[in-house]
Amino acid sequence: MKGFGAYMPVTPFELATIAATAADNKKAHDICVLDLTELSDVCDYFVICTGDNAPMVDAIVDEVREKVRKNTGISPLSTEGRANLKWILVDFGSVVVHVFQPETRDYYRLEHLWAQAPQVKLDLEGAL
């Protein structure tokens, strides 16, 4: 979200939407955005998605990092898990993006751990 050569501030919800849309652009599936604003002091939103294999997970993470930076000027505080590519966590502070391979997502079941968190409905048709 650019304005006159500078980035406009974005809300955590907008950042989560950009990250989810970027993941969708790279064909991530089972994209889920959880609203943690009432449940966590650590972050406001989780974006959780799945890539079919290691190269796809890696490409999804690259797309999320690039599109968030391009649209907001925000870079992640950290990125964890790139060594094995089974679960990569991208921490943007108020938004944490989790990109899984299918078997790892099934094992950790983050949506079930945070079942009390409302799921955000997004229309992921638009490209960034």
Image: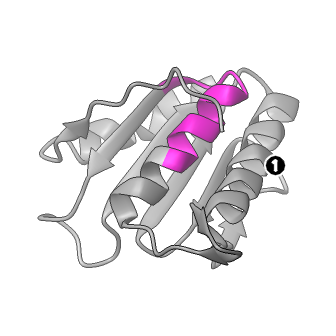
- The residue located at (67%, 72%) in the rendering is 73
**Residue 12 at x, y percent in the picture:** 37, 64
Specify how the rendered protein is coloured: one colour
How many labels sit on residues?
A: 1
- The residue located at (46%, 75%) in the rendering is 9
Q: Return the residue at label 1.
A: 84
4 and 19: which is toward the camera: 4
Q: Which range of residues does the magenta coloring cover?
A: 18-30
- Among the 4 quarters of the image, the one containing residue 92: bottom right
Please say whether residue 100 is visible from this viewpoint. Answer: no
Answer above or below: position of 54 versus 43.
Answer: above
Amino acid type, mark 1: Asn
Q: Say if the magenta span includes residue 114.
A: no
Q: Is residue 14 left or right of residue 104?
A: left
**Residue 86 at x, y percent in the picture:** 71, 41
- The residue located at (63%, 36%) in the rendering is 23
In the displayed image of the protein, which residue is found farthest to the front? 4
**Residue 95 at x, y percent in the picture:** 44, 63
The N terminus: image quadrant: bottom right
127 and 115: which is toward the camera: 127
Q: Is residue 12 left or right of residue 93?
A: left
Looking at the rendered structure, the secondary structure element under dot 1 is loop
Answer above or below: position of 114 versus 100.
Answer: below
The chief SS type of the magenta part is helix
Q: Is residue 8 left or right of residue 14?
A: right
The C terminus: image quadrant: top right
Label 1 neighbour load within 10 Å: few <14, some 14-19, many 20+: few
- Among the 4 quarters of the image, the one containing residue 66: bottom right
Answer above or below: position of 119 versus 1.
Answer: above
